[in-house]
């Protein structure tokens, strides 16, 4: 492990030794913190819950019976998970997430999303709301925020002309400024210039979603937040903060 990472983790451990770390959230975000239940523990029968949002049992891997173009195109990905995301007003969405693409699929990712990125590390998926009546795709490049090779960590969720941007959160309250570029602790969701949601992926996890959004948009943000809570670090490095 790189020397700077070792130093940052040691410093982070000392920083949070006496209290639970808190993300530095954009002050414009209007939302209550929703602690996550179900993230830790056995993966068999795993269900993720926070606030009014929950999933059915998370499935790792999927069958070839799916007919969604996104899924059919990336059958070879090494890490695949799917679940149903339940949200407000009886909204529900079928969610499929993939990472650890085959090297031959990287170009397919770029073509599918129409992005000229040169990153190799992607987390992407499809969200089908209301039995396929509305379909969203999402992609996040460099989800771990690897500052040694691919410093930026950003992406988007889209449905036709609708777009929700995803940006990394690198700061913790009380953290020295020099540490804020070393680790990604979560991601925030933006519509235009407004921050409408966020997810903390440290420890058990926390989610924030602006309740002024319509039910579908809130459920879509929840689906991506849940996916980020479930995904495994592609570099097989445990970056969770000790409790």
Image: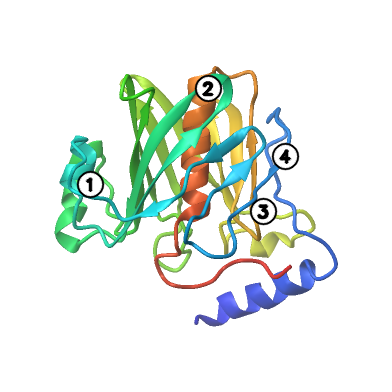
Say whether disc 1 or disc 3 marks the residue closer to the N-terminus.
1
Are discs 1 and 4 less than 8 Å apart at CB?
no
Q: Which of marks 2 and 3 is in front?
A: 2
* Cα–Cα span, label 4 and label 3: 17 Å
Q: Which of marks 1 and 2 is in front?
A: 2
Please report the residue visible at 44 percent of the width from the left and 45 percent of the height from the top: 154
Say whether disc 4 or disc 3 marks the residue closer to the N-terminus.
4
Mark on residue 33? 4
Are discs 4 and 2 less than 8 Å apart at CB?
no
All told, the count of numbered labels is: 4
Are discs 4 and 3 less than 8 Å apart at CB?
no
Viewer-nearest residue: 125 or 195: 125
* Cα–Cα span, label 2 and label 3: 35 Å
Q: Callout 2: 10 Å neighbours few (<14), some, many (20+)?
A: few
Coordinates of residue 102 in the picture (x, y in percent) = 20, 61
Q: Callout 4: 10 Å neighbours few (<14), some, many (20+)?
A: some
- The residue tagged 3 is 171
- The residue tagged 1 is 109
Viewer-nearest residue: 29 or 135: 135
Q: With respect to residue 90, does 112 lie above or below?
A: below
């Amino acid at each position: 492990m790189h020397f700077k990472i070792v130093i940052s983790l040691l410093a982070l451990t000392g920083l949070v030794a006496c209290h639970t770390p808190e993300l530095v959230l954009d002050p414009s975000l209007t939302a209550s913190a929703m602690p996550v239940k179900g993230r830790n523990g056995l993966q068999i029968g795993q269900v993720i819950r926070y606030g009014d949002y929950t999933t059915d049992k998370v499935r790792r891997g999927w069958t070839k019976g799916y007919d969604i173009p996104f899924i059919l195109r990336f059958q070879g990905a090494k890490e695949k998970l799917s679940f149903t995301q339940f949200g407000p007003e009886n909204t529900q969405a079928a969610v499929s997430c993939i990472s650890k693409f085959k090297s031959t699929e990287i170009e397919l990712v770029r073509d599918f999303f129409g992005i000229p990125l040169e990153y190799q590390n992607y987390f992407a998926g499809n969200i089908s709301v209301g039995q396929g009546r509305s379909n969203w795709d999402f992609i996040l490049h460099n989800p771990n925020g690897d500052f040694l090779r691919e410093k930026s960590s950003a992406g988007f969720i889209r449905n036709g002309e609708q777009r929700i941007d995803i940006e990394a959160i690198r700061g913790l309250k009380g953290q020295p400024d020099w540490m804020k570029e070393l680790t990604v602790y979560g991601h925030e969701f933006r519509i235009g210039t407004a921050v409408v949601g966020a997810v903390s992926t440290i420890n058990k996890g926390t989610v924030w979603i602006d309740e002024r959004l319509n039910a579908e948009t809130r459920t879509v943000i929840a689906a991506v937040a849940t996916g980020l809570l479930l995904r495994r670090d592609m570099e097989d490095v445990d970056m969770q903060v000790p409790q």
